[in-house]
Amino acid sequence: MKQNNYQEYLTLKARVEVLQRSQRNLLGEDLAPLNTKELEQLENQLETSLKHIRSTKVEQVFHAWNMDKEQILVEANKALRKKVEECSTPVPPRLGWDAGVHNMSYNRIPTHSEEFFYPLAGGNQTLQMGYNPVSSEEMNVATASNSQHVNPFIPGWML
């Protein structure tokens, strides 16, 4: 039994030495005794480890980003639900308005004197603004008298 324990001890001791040497090599220490093939194996091992580390990092960042995005969407969803609930619930009427306390009659108060605006007569579709004491009949008589001196480049109303 002592022989078995001693043998196991030696095996574990050798294994620890190999792992310690491998660790030093991975840290860039004690590389001088390694040949080209061992250096290439170490390089491949480091590249594989870096790829694994980077993929794990990307997964964690992506997961954290998704969690943040999900949290933002949940909060936005809650806010939208609250707005929908506010819009869909009927607004209770105010008691003062229902009781007639604030009933007032509103009369139209003209801002301009009504004498300045005349309705368009005779189907005349021209715009009429301001005070115009001349009726449309008088205007037709005036344009008929001016039509003798018609200038084709100046409209009749300018003469």
Image (cartoon, rainbow, N blue to C red):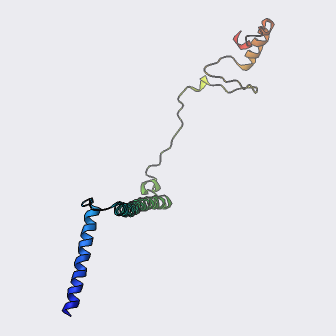
Q: Nearer the viewer, residue 9 or 59?
A: 9
Q: Nearer the viewer, residue 127 or 36?
A: 36
Residue that sits furthest to the bottom in the current view = 1
Q: Quadrant of residue 12?
A: bottom left
Q: Residue at x 79, y 10 (%)?
A: 147
Q: Residue at x 47, y 48 (%)?
A: 103
134 with respect to 50 (left or right): right
Say above or below: 103 vs 40: above
Give residue 88's position: percent from left, percent from top: 50, 61
Quadrant of the rendering where the C terminus is positioned: top right
Give residue 37's position: percent from left, percent from top: 37, 62
Say above or below: 60 vs 107: below
Q: Quadrant of residue 72?
A: bottom left
Q: Nearer the viewer, residue 137 or 37?
A: 37
Give residue 152's position: percent from left, percent from top: 78, 10
Q: Nearer the viewer, residue 120 or 29?
A: 29
Q: Residue at x 73, y 13 (%)?
A: 155
138 with respect to 93 (left or right): right
Q: Quadrant of residue 134?
A: top right
**Residue 92 seen anywhere in this rendered image of the structure:** no
Residue that sits furthest to the left in the current view = 2
